[in-house]
Image (cartoon, helix red, strand yellow):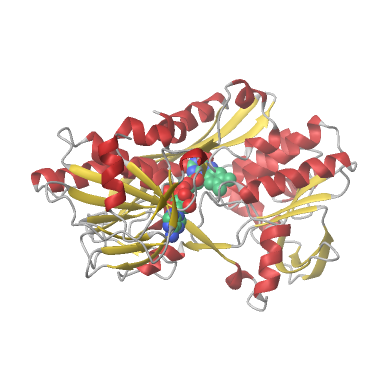
Amino acid sequence: MSDISRRSFFKFLTLTAGATLVTHASNNDSSLHTLHKTKLLEKNSKQKRVVVVGGGIGGLTVAENIKANDPKNEIEVIILERNSHYFACPMSNTLFGEIKEVEDEKIPFIYTYNKAEKNHNIDVIITEMIDADVSKKMITTTLGTIEYDYVVVAPGIDYNYKKLFPTWSSEKIRRATKETPAAMFADSGKEKYILLDQLHAWKEEGGEGYFVIVPPKGGKVRCKPASYERACMVSEYIKKYNLPGKVYILDNASSPKAKGPVFIDIFIKEHRDTIVFNGMSATEMENRIKKAGFTLENFKKKANFSKVTDFFATCSIEDVDFDKKEIQFHYADSFDDDGKQDSLKYAIANIIPYHRGNKTAELFDVKRDAWGGVICAPNKIYSVSDSTVYVAGDIIGYHKFDPSAQASSTVGMLTGESIAKRILHGKDEIDFTKVGITCFSMVSTAPLKAIEISKTIVVTKEGLAKSDKTKLSIREGMGLIGWYQAMVETPFKY
Ligand SMILES: Cc1cc2nc3c(=O)[nH]c(=O)nc-3n(C[C@H](O)[C@H](O)[C@H](O)COP(=O)(O)OP(=O)(O)OC[C@H]3O[C@@H](n4cnc5c(N)ncnc54)[C@H](O)[C@@H]3O)c2cc1C
C-alpha cells in the first residue's frame, strides 16, 4: 500500500478512547500500528467509498472487480476482515487424503491479504464489524467507525447447533465445536486443523474404530457435497496407512444429498472396504440395489435411483455423549421401516449442524429471510430494502444460488462490475445469466478423480436468478486443482 493510501486508511477510523492496536493486512506483525484517539475525518469527497464486510471469496472478488472497472481510481474500496489470514475451504478436504498432486502443485490453503491489496489497490483492515447504522451509512468495528457510500455484506455462514440439538446447553455446543468440529468455516482453518490433528493422532494410536461424518440434516447448506467428499478423502488416508478403521457416514437421508448416485457408485467401487453408509457396507449396498431390481450399470439413472434409495437405510442423529464418544440416532432400515433407537461409538466424529446466514448480516437493518440471507431486490444484487447495501457470497438471499465458492466468485465478479458502473456511469444493471456454476468433489486418488457438477443460471419473470440445466460427470481430478487455482488462489495472489 502506498503512503498516501496508508495515511488515508488511518483517517477512516474513529477510535474508542485510549490507545488501540490496529493490524493492517499489508503489514506483518512487525508493523502493528498504535493509534491514539483520532477524530473521524470527512470522507474524501472526490472518491465514493465502498466498504466490504468480509474478505472471503465473495467479498474479495467483489472488491477486486470494482477496482478492475475503475480505471481512473475514482472509487475507494476497503475490506473489513476479522482474521489476519484466510483459510480457503474449497478443496481443503484433500488435506485429509494427503493427495500427491495437491502437494506437488504446492497448493496453498492459507492466504494473507498483502498481494490482493498491492495488486488491486484496495485496503484490507483487520477488524471485526460489530454494528451498523444504515440510516447514517456507518459501520462500527472493534477499531472504531467507518462511513460508506455503498456497503457489500459478505460474511459467509454460521452454524445452527440449536436447530439440530434444541435441548443442548451452550457448554455442550462449545464441546461440539472443540471435540467434534464441523469444519465448514473459513475460521482461519481452526476447525479443519483440529480434525486433521485428530486424524493423525488416530493413526498413531492404531486407527481402529470409526471416523464418523454426520452431514447437515437439510436446509440451505454451504457446499452440500463437502461431507461426502471428506468421507472419500479420509478413506484414502485409511487406505494409504493401511488402518483397520473405517469412515462411517451417518446420514438422515437414504443417499448423499448432493451428487447422490455418483457418490454411491464411488463408495462401492473406490472405497469398498473403507466407507460404511448408514450401516451399509459396499456389498450390502450392492445387495440392496439388486433387491430393488437394478444393476451396478443402471442404478444411477434418475428414475431407478429413487427406487433404489427406498431400500437404503437412514440414520438420524439425536444426541452425542462426548464422554463416552457415542452418538445416539434413529435408525430405519428402509423407507418402509419405522425404525429404532441405536447408538454408535466413534474414534473421531465430524458432526455438521444446520447452516444459517452469518449473524453479522443481522447488524444491518435490512430484510432477511428465515435462513438469515439478505433478501435482494428482483434482478438486483442489493437489498430489497436499501439499494446501497449489496451482498456477496453465501449470504445472498432471494436468488437461488447454491452457497459455493463458484457462485461467490462468478456472481462477485458481476457485482463488482455492476457497482463500479453504477458509481461511475449511473448504470444499475447485472446480468445473472452470465453466471455458470461448477462444483467439484475429489473422490479418489489412484487414479485422481473428481465429480463435477455444472449448472447454468436463468432469471425468472419475477427477477429471481436460479440454476437451470445441470450436468454431472466424473472427471480427472486435476480439473479440480485448476478450478481451485482460478477461483480461489487467483483473488488472493494475483
Ligand atoms: C470443506 C469445504 C469444501 C468446499 N468445497 C467447495 C467446492 O468444491 N466448490 C465450491 O464452489 N465451493 C466449495 N465450498 C464452499 C465455499 O468455500 C463457500 O461457499 C465460500 O467460501 C463462500 O464465500 P463467502 O465469501 O460467502 O464466505 P467466506 O469465504 O466464509 O468469507 C466470509 C469472511 O467474512 C469474515 N467475517 C465474517 N463476519 C465478519 C465480521 N463481523 N467482521 C469482519 N469479517 C467478518 C470471515 O472471517 C470470512 O473471512 C466448500 C466449503 C467447505 C467448508
Q: 237 or 151, which lies in front?
A: 151
Identity of the residue drawn at 73% across and 39% down: 268
Q: Quadrant of residue 110?
A: top right
- Residue placed at 73% from the left, 72% from the top? 338
Identify whether 490 is placed above or below 373. above
In the image, taking residue 268 as reference, residue 4 lies left or right, namely left
Q: At which x and y percent is residue 141?
A: 39, 61
Report the residue that reaches farthest toward the top: 104
Q: Residue at x 43, y 42 (%)?
A: 25
Res 434 seen here: no
Question: What residue is at 58 percent from the left and 51 percent from the top?
Answer: 184
Eyeballing the image, is 83 above or below 270?
below
Identify the image quadrant of the C terminus: top left
Tell whether 43 sits left or right of 201.
left
Can you see residue 412? yes
**Residue extending furthest toward the left:** 425
- Looking at the image, the residue that sits furthest to the bottom is 167
- Between 162 and 53, the one lying in front of the other is 53
Q: Which image quadrant: the N terminus?
A: top left
Q: Is 65 situated above or below 16?
A: above
Q: Residue 493 at what x, y percent from top left?
A: 43, 30
**Residue 151 drawn at (x, y percent):** 27, 56
Q: Position of residue 171 (x, y in %)?
A: 69, 72
- Image quadrant assignment for residue 107: top right
Number of numbered discs overlaid on the protein picture: 0
